[in-house]
Amino acid sequence: MSLSVPEPIASIASMAHGAGRIVLDVREGGINVRRKPDESPVTQADTLAEEFIERELEKAFPGVPVIGEELVAAGRQVAPKERFFLVDPLDGTKEFIAGRDSFSTNIALVEHGRPKVGALYAPASGELFVGGPEMGLWRARVDAHESFRAAALEPFAPVGEARSMRRAAVSHSHLDEKTVEWLRAHGVEELIRMGSAFKFCLLVKGEADVYPRFGPTMEWDTAAGQAILEAAGGVVLLPDGSGPLTYGHAETGFLNPGFIAFAPGVEVRA
C-alpha cells in the first residue's frame, strides 16, 4: 500500500472488525432472541459487540461520549457533545436472526453534528469500508476470524462518473409506501434489497445510484454510512433536497427524519 492509514481510520476499522468477529461467533454458537420495550428484536451479539466497542473506544478516545443503540435501549442515554461516537454493533438484526448475511457493524465519529469518520464492516463477507469527508476512503476484505492489520486497508477510488438514477438500494424489511411512491415518481424501477447500512456502500461501489429512506431510522443506523458516502463524493440530503442529514438530536431520541442518499456522479433530485 502506497499511503499510510491515518488515525482514527485504523483504530475504528480495527474495532469494527473485532465486533464483527463477536457477532459471527454468536451466530455459530446459537442465537438467543429477546424483545426490547419497543418490541424490536435484540440478541446477545448486539450486546456483546457493543460492550466490546465501548471498551475499545474508551481506551483509544478517552472522554469522548459513546451513544450506542443498546445503551440507549437500556435507558443509559449519554448526552452528545461537540464530539461523540455513534455505534450500532449489529445493524440488520432481523437479517441476522433470519440467517441472511446482510448485517453490519457501524461506528461513526461525529463532530459538530456532522459525521467525520465512519466504519462499516460486513462480517459475513469480510468487506470493510472506512473513511470520512476530510480523510479519504479506504477498503479491505478481512476475514472476521483473522487478525486485523491496518496494512490491509487500501485507498478506494469510487465510481464517480455522471450517470442516471436507475438503481435504488432499498430495505429488505422496511420498504414503506412513501419510498415506493418516490421511486415511481423518479422512474426508478430496479430495486436492490438489502438489510443494514451497507446499502451506502452499494452507492460507493457504483452498484446502486440512490438510497431513499422515508421510514424511521436512528442516527447510529446512518452516520457511518454517510461519512463513507461523503468521502466518496456522494451526499445524504433531507427529502426536500435540503440538508445534509445531521446528528446529535437527543431531543428526538436520536430518530432521523427521512433522507435520500445519492451516489457520486448522480444528479441530486428531491
Image (tube, grey):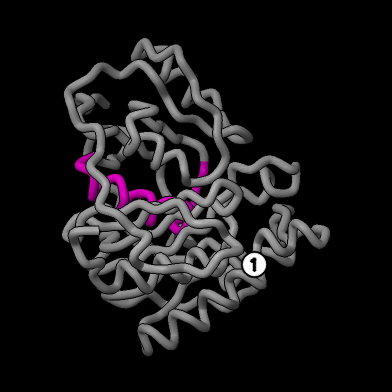
Residue 169, percent across and down?
45, 29
96 and 4: which is toward the camera: 4
175 and 151: which is toward the camera: 151
Residue at the location (74% across, 43% down)?
99
Which part of the image, by quadrant, shows the C terminus?
top left
Main secondary-structure element of the magenta-colored stretch: helix
Quarter where residue 138 is shown:
bottom left
Amino acid tagged 1:
Ile
189 and 159: which is toward the camera: 159
Residue 195, percent across and down?
57, 40
Q: Is residue 138 in view from this perspective?
A: yes
Residue 142, percent across and down?
49, 56
In the rendered view, tell whether residue 52 sits above or below residue 118: below
In the rendered view, tell whether residue 38 sits above or below residue 265: below
Quarter where residue 82 is shown:
bottom left
Look at the image and give the residue range highlighted in magenta.
216-234
Q: Position of 8 compared to 177: left or right?
A: left
Residue beneath disc 1: 22
In the rendered view, tell whether residue 57 sits above or below residue 35: below
Q: Position of 135 compared to 36: left or right?
A: left
